[in-house]
Structure formats: structure tokens, C-alpha cells
Amino acid sequence: MHYSLGIDAGGTYTDAVLIRDSDGEIIDSNKALTTYPDPLAGIKNVIDGLNPEYLENVKLVSVSTTLSTNTILEGTGFPVALILIGDHPLEKELPAEHVLFTAGGHNHNGEEVAALDLEAIEKFAMQVKDKVSAFAISSYFSTRNPEHELKARDLVLELTGLPAVCGHELSQELGAYERAVTAFLNAQLIPITRQFVQSIISDIMKRGINARLLMLKCDGSVLGIRDALNKPIETIFSGPAASLVGASYLSGFKTCAVVDVGGTSTDISSICMGVPDLSDEGAIVGGWKTRVRAIRMETTATGGDSHIWTVDRELFLGPRRVMPLAVAAVEYPDFLNNLKRTIMPPREDLDENIQPTKFFVRSGYQAGELSRAEAEILEVIGEKPVSVPEIKTLIRKDLHPLTLDSLIRKRLVQAIGFTPTDALHVLGEYTSWNADASRVGAERLARLMRMAPGEFCIAVKKRVARNMALHLLSYILPDIPRASIEKILDGNYPARFKLDIPVVLLGGPVRAHRKELEELIDAEILVPEYAEVGNAVGALVGKGIKRVEILIRPASLMSPEQDFLVFAPDSRLKFETYTEALGTATELGKKLVMDYMQDCGLSGNQVEISVERKTISPEGWNHPPMETNLLIMGIGMRGLRV
């Protein structure tokens, strides 16, 4: 009997599930805290809780994660240098601090328009190599000829030893700016994804598990682990994609909306007749538009670990993730006593980082370049949580909250605070951790809000449900202004929204929010069995899907009967006749699809390949097509019941 292991690493929990391959039944599952900075301990803990008899016969391991997505949403990615080659727009905002504009690039036919300035690239690389973790390279019209990107990448690798990402490797679509942003975000995620994947490989090898390793992509399909390491940007929404596929599998609904409440964010998506709803645009994450094909999703930085804080009797929810007080009291033995004796800050000093329930602890990440103020504060923050008053006492002067914020963004400090998870502990609806710490935190914040602790926690719970409802409705009603939806939700009207499709809820304590959500929306709302590990299930039941796009054009419109250019991923080919170009392009596309499928462990009758051809020619054109677009798509299915 063979089994498959699904693992999902979220911002708070790492989930695991075992599925029997013969009939697709879930036979075991487990949850454990995600560990920072090294996720290996969390992965080890979650697998340790599974039946070892089944683990011996695991032949497939498939993973998903929200770690990459959360990194971009929270602005805590690793520093990246961006090299832009050719005629890139100068007026648009770029995400990188270290940027080089240099000569080079090609035209629409892939012909060089300017020589590549390797000297400028060498000088730039040597200047910033100690300040960044990776390089991103984007050349003008690199989708038609990647030569300059590849030369720049090889030079950077030789000079610095740091990973370098090329835009053409991630997207074959035109759009130099979006491709540059995509390359930057991908480079930013390489260290995080590499550490995550290596942690999983290390653990399964130590257990003697001989299994193929796959990773879920952001469109709900799977890819081989080698591609995942090189193109982590394609996994940015793998967690939400896993929740979508997993929700359909667990509920039996081929068509449904999905609300996945995680520790850092809540994600809304939908599936129709078993096919994920994909975005026509590139995925947008952290406000940046990419060229990555992904599920259409509405996401909010509201989760079980979102920071609850207050200023001027106003309640704020997020956007940052913090460690819940209830969890901190278990992780750090003296934390509860410290929480009780910490003084209340003056009301006029309150902000996101100065709260009577906010504490800070070293994360374990190695510090890079720091300002004097950052270094001074980091020196007094150790392995035990400290409050702002304690930090002030230790450095013997006042501190600027923005300095603390910078240390959090650099992943050097982990913040602890009151969260929706703590509110549920106070209300007795979720009690996995130390409820005493949650109660102390609720009392302190409720005092600032001039409310009773229970009343305050109910307000937090309702705010979470209201946010879930707002984002669900915004997703389902994309043409309705959000302000109008908010007005109806928050108004005292004898009416409410009714949905014609079922809604599936996933997440740890998500059952606690079902009643409040039903009060806001009239819909069939289901919390299926194994909802708490739905993402790990989704990581296993994704299909193998590979799309290869190839463009064919005449080399010159002056002689459209001879010499044709084929623009394929990573290559630019030239043929004398259109027939030769079309045949070679089609076979090349099929080979790329099958190579990908074999890397996913799929072959032969498990893979179905289709070829779609679209041609463009002006009226009266009596020559081979002016432009031919080939879409070669392969769909592979494993033995699991889907």
C-alpha cells in the first residue's frame, strides 16, 4: 500500500496530511507551529505526529506554503539589486533600493540594438554585493532574445556567487516593467524558498523516505522541486491555491467560494466545475503587478495572528502578524509574569509598536547592515521578550518606534501582541494555548477602549467576521465599489447579501467565525472535516499543468515567404520555411511539456497534451501568417481521487 504526504507551511502553523493512494482517503493529519528562522523544526514536529507505519510507504511528497506570500505582504523580503538593460521606463516606481540602468537590449525581432555594458554591470555588482542577497536582471525584449540577460547573470554569479534571476525565465509576455518587478520579487524569495525546500528534503531523507518531491504553484497546478527552487515567484500564492483545491476535495463541491483564514492573512478564491478561477492579469502581490499566472484571489492582511492594537479608543486589526500572547506564554515560561507587571504606556504615546500588550524578542536571523539606533536597540533585545519600557530602561534613553519597525521588517525582531486568536481564548472558543495571558491582554486593551474584556473580545471577533464578509463580497462582486458593499454591510438595513454558490471555510479555529459570517451573508456555509489542514490536502491533489507559449514571425515583412523566427522559452530559432518553423516549434513545445511532466513524476497515459494555434494576418495577405501564436498545454493526473 502506497501513501502520499502533503505539507503546508503557513505563517503560524505547518500542517501535514497522509492520503492513501488507492482510494484518496485521508488516514492521518497533524499540525505544528511554524518555526523561524529555520522551518526545519516545525516540519520535523508536524511529521513526527504522523503514524510512522504509513510514512515508511510514502512515495510522493507535495508541499505548499504562504511563507513567500507573507514575506512580500509584510515587506520582510531579503534585499535584492535590480539590473535593467536597455530602454526601460524611468518614470515608474521600482521596488529595489539598488538599481542599475545600463546599455543593451534587443528589438521586437530579437536583434541587438545596443552593446551590453558589462563594465558597468561589473562595477555595480562589486559595489552592492555585500548589501544584497540576490540579483534580478531584466533586459528590454528579452522574451525575443535572452542573450543579454544570460550574459549579465553569468557575470554576476562569477563576481559575487549570489543567485541571479532573469526576467525571461519567468514570463514570455511582453511588458518590460512588469517583467522586471517579477524578476525582483522572485530574487527576493529565493533564500526563503531554498531554506524551506532544503528543510523538507533534509527531514524526509533522515527518515529514509524515498519519495518524489513536488510543490504547488499559484494556479493550483504542481511543479517539480527544481523549478520551485529556481522560480519561487510561481509559488507566491501556492498556499491559497492549495486551500482552493483542498476545499473542493474535502467538501465535494466542484463549484464553490473558499475563505481560508490563516495566521497572517485571509484569502478568498473560487473554483468552477473543478477548475480554479484564474486571473486574466498577472498576479498582484504587495501592490506590485507581476507577470505570473495565478488564481484570482482577494486577500487581506487579517488572520488569526494579526496584531490587535488601539489608539484614541479606536480598534485596529493588523496588518502585521505577531506571536499571540497565548502562544508566547507557552514558549517563554516567565512571559505571563512579565505581561502582568509591565506598566501601561501613556495614552498619548500609543501607536502600533507602543502598546501595553506589545513585546519584542530576537528572531534568530543574522543582522546585516544596521544604523546606530538599530544596533543599540537590537543589543538589548535578547531571547526573552521585552517591552518598550524595558528597552528604554536598558538603553537609558527614549526610542523612536520607527526603529523598532525597521528591525521587524529586517526579520531581526519577532513582535508579540494581542491577536484574534487571543480573543477566542478569552471567549473559550479556542483553547490550544495559555488563556491566562490572553485574558491579561484583553483586560489591558479593554481598559483603553473603556469596555469590558468580554465585550472587547466579541468586538474583535465581529471585526474579523466583518472583514471576511467584506472581502468575500468584493471578490464575488468585482464591479461593485467596495465602499458600497461596506455601506450595506455596516448599515442598519432590513436586507443582506445572498450568495448562490456555497462557501467553504478553512483554517484552524475557523468554526468560531461561522455564526458571525452567517449573520452577515445568506449562504450555504460549510466547515468540512479536516478543514484545519485543508491546505496540506490541496498540496497533494493539484494537477500537473504546463503551458508553453511559442511565437512565430517572418524575419522581415519585406520577404514574408522565407526566413521565419521562432521565439520559444530560453531560445530564438531561425528557419527557411514556415512549415519547418511550425513543425519544429510544435515539437519543441511538446518536449518542454513532457520534460516538465516527467520532473513531476508523470508520463505516458497520465499526460494529455493539446496544441492551440492562433494566426494573425492583415486582410488580403497571401503569405504565411504574419504572426502565429502556439499554446501547447499538458495536463497530468496522478492516481489520487480528484
Image: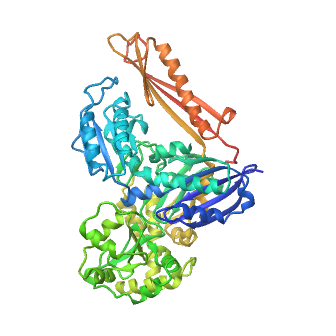
Residue found 45% across the figure and 31% down from its top = 569
Q: Residue furthest right?
A: 1
> Which scheme is used to colour this image of the protein?
rainbow
Name the foreground residue: 10 vs 486: 10
x and y percentages locating residue 166 in the rendered image: 38, 39
**Residue 525 visible in the shown view:** no
Name the foreground residue: 198 vs 7: 198
x and y percentages locating residue 621 in the rendered image: 38, 13
Name the foreground residue: 372 vs 105: 372
Q: Is residue 382 left or right of residue 546?
A: left
Residue found 63% across the figure and 55% down from its top = 204
Q: Reply above or below: 224 against 481.
A: above
Q: Reply above or below: 284 against 526.
A: above
Q: Residue furthest bottom?
A: 341
Q: Tell me which corner region of the image, top left, top right, bottom left or bottom right, holds residue 484.
A: bottom left
x and y percentages locating residue 471 in the rendered image: 44, 60
